[in-house]
Image (spheres, rainbow, N blue to C red):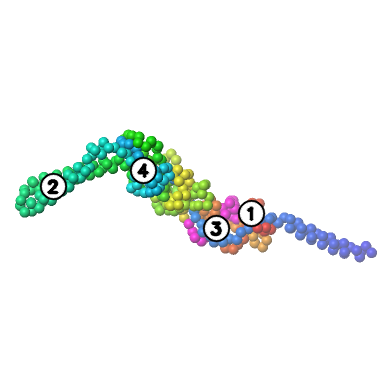
Amino acid sequence: MRLKQIPWIFILLVFACNKSQESLDTQIAVPVSVQDVSLQPIEEFVTTTGTVKAIQQVVLKAETDGFYRLGKDSRGKPYVLGDYVERGDIIIYLDNPELENNIKIESQKLNLDISRREFEKQKSLYDKGGVTLRELKDAERAFIDAKYNYDNAIIQLAKMKIVAPFSGFIVDLPYYTEGTRVSLNAPMVQIMNYKKLYTEINLPGKELGRIKVEQPVRILNYTLPKDTLWGKISQVSPAIDADTRSFKAFVEVDNQALLLRPGMFVKAEVVVAKKDSAIVIPKDIILAGGHGKHVFVVVKGAAEERRITTGLENPDDVEVTDGLKVDERLIVKGFETLRNRTKVKVVR
């Protein structure tokens, strides 16, 4: 009776062992996440920082003394901080009746007209032989002197007005009581046009051969997380600083939307190389060992180690030039403890 029961017991033991082995196999499979290898664009860039400044900025000072009178905008309101002014707008008047009286602008204008007429008359007579060459030249000199005097009077009168030399924003407007007499060289107004900005950057000396004029530069600021501005390299110094082992360059930034303001601290990424289509993988999944760089892909339920050759790279991504193919399943999470042919379970 016992002899007949042995086969059944043996079968049950074998079945239990198989089930136990299957359970064990399931438990030792390492859970991993994968992504499909695909073609993507990639840029290689050099990162640095700088402070943006306005390309056009000026501090206007009083070129003569006079009584302070603030100009008015197109709405008839006195100018204030932040106002936009067009080139040629009169921002401040420095009234000076004494100076106007001494300039004698109307007298200078009349004298210029008389001198011109006299010169034209003498020139006509000279052509007919009616006056000598000396008389003609005397009339010409008198006309030239009168023109110089009139032009100088215009220049002196212009000093009584503080005029915007270019279009921009009033960023500083020192306060003076209306009618107060201000002295020569007193600061009157500061104007900036920051639709175009520039920043001075310092780059590692090893990058000198890769930084060129006209290279694109991506400009980022922490206050503009969703906005990226673009600039370009405008100047590059050919010399490396002996103390810092870096070199200087200037970046021009297009700021037509006025997203950036002068004085802001920005991060600049100088694009030195790019490809529109390449196999690109995350940089942080690459492992390095004595046999070089490698990653893992999933093949028939197991991790397969792949040695790779890389090309362009940036802080986040790397181009793979050899070792991977499009549509392979690349392990991007759970790869840290893997060995070649380790059984894995894809959990995505």
Rendered residue at 19%/42% (across/down)? 107
Q: Nearer the viewer, mark 4 or mark 3?
A: 4
Rounded to the nearest angstrom, the CA distance separating label 4 from label 2 is: 41 Å
Question: Which of the image's four quarters has the C terminus?
Answer: bottom right
Q: Is residue 2 above or below residue 190?
A: below
Residue picked out by circle 2: 140
Question: Which of the image's four quarters has the N terminus?
Answer: bottom right
Residue 262 is tagged as: none
Disc on the earlier residue, 1 or 4: 4
Magenta span: chief secondary structure: strand
Number of residues whose C-alpha sits closer than 10 Å to that of mark 3, classed few (under 14), some (14–19) or many (20 or more): many
Q: In this view, does 22 lie above or below 83?
A: below
Rendered residue at 87%/62% (across/down)? 9
Residue range (magenta): 274-295
Circles 4, 2 touching at the beta carbon (< 8 Å): no
Residue picked out by circle 4: 71
Residue picked out by circle 3: 280
What element does badge 4 sit on?
loop
Residue type marked 3: Val
Picture coordinates of residue 335, whole percent (x, y): 64, 53
Horizontal side of 314 relative to 147 (left or right) equals right
Rendered residue at 22%/42% (across/down)? 105
Front residue (pair 268, 117): 117
